[in-house]
Image: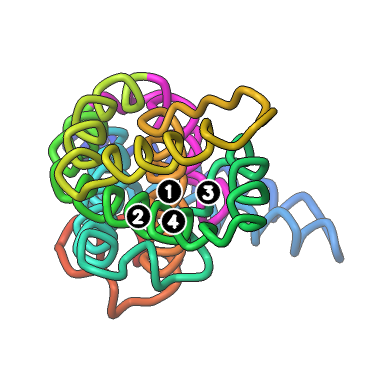
Amino acid sequence: MSQYENVKPCRRTAMTLLLATIAMYAVASGPLRAGWLEKGQDLIGGLAGDESGGAQLGADELRAGLKEALRVGTETVVSQLGQTGGFNSDPAIHIPLPQSLDTVKATLDTVGMGSMLDDLELKLNRAAEAATPKAKALFLQSIQQMTLEDAQAVYSGPDDAATRYFEDKMSAPLTAEMSPVVSESLSQVGAIAAYDKVMSRYQNVPFAPDVKADLSEYVVSEGIGGIFYYLAKEEAAIRQDPAKRTTDILKKVFGKP
């Protein structure tokens, strides 16, 4: 029986590679000899790391880590934006009036009623703030649809790669799911009533051109955009700041050099 027969397969492979490297080292000279030796050491070191289970991440762990980053980020962002002022007081994501209402505002300004539009703008932001906590379950559910292939593609990408993947894949279904949530919020905060009042005043102005605005579609789009804006920042923080890695899987996936 060979002295190597009882060695575990992985160790036996590493030993074979070591012997091969030594042989190459013996017949090489100068810089070539040093290069072969370094390559052999690197390869054997990698195999040793694989055997211990500490050097490589499995595909499932990658996916779990990226999902966890999105989940933790979503929890943080929803908490931030789903409160009074979350949208309205934040210049980065404040929701302005739809451009289609610019003519309405300009017209009502001329008759001293422009403040009605200011009230409507405030209520659009309040609707987004009210809808954000209700939308959390939709975001968390969507995150679970990330595949192994998706995870492998975004893991080595830029600091917002997971967020941008999520935005690309899930914006359409999230829009569909959030529309009734936002419509309810628009009604609850008085945005629909404010809009109807504005349009009633506007239509009484002689020769005013016809104007329409889909408030629900607009607030859904702006609201989702605001959530993704801050979700990207949270993902970047998790990748860069160890203090942001609050769970074991985040520490394992994003703590690797």
Labels 4 and 1: the sequence-earlier one: 4
- Describe the colour scheme in one phrase: rainbow
101 on left or right of 65:
right
For the N terminus, give its image quadrant: top left
User: Which contiguous range is marked in magenta?
Assistant: 145-172
60 vs 112, nearest the viewer: 112
**Label 2 sits on what residue type?**
Ala
Q: Position of residue 68 (x, y in %)?
A: 22, 49
Labels 1 and 3: the sequence-earlier one: 3
Is 165 situated above or below 238?
above
**Label 4: which secondary element:** helix
Which label sits on residue 97?
3
Labels 4 and 2: the sequence-earlier one: 2
Q: Residue at x 42, y 34 (%)?
A: 200
**Residue designated by label 4:** 116
Dot 4 crowding, Cα within 10 Å, few <14, some 14–19, many 20+: some
Marks 4/3: CA–CA distance = 12 Å
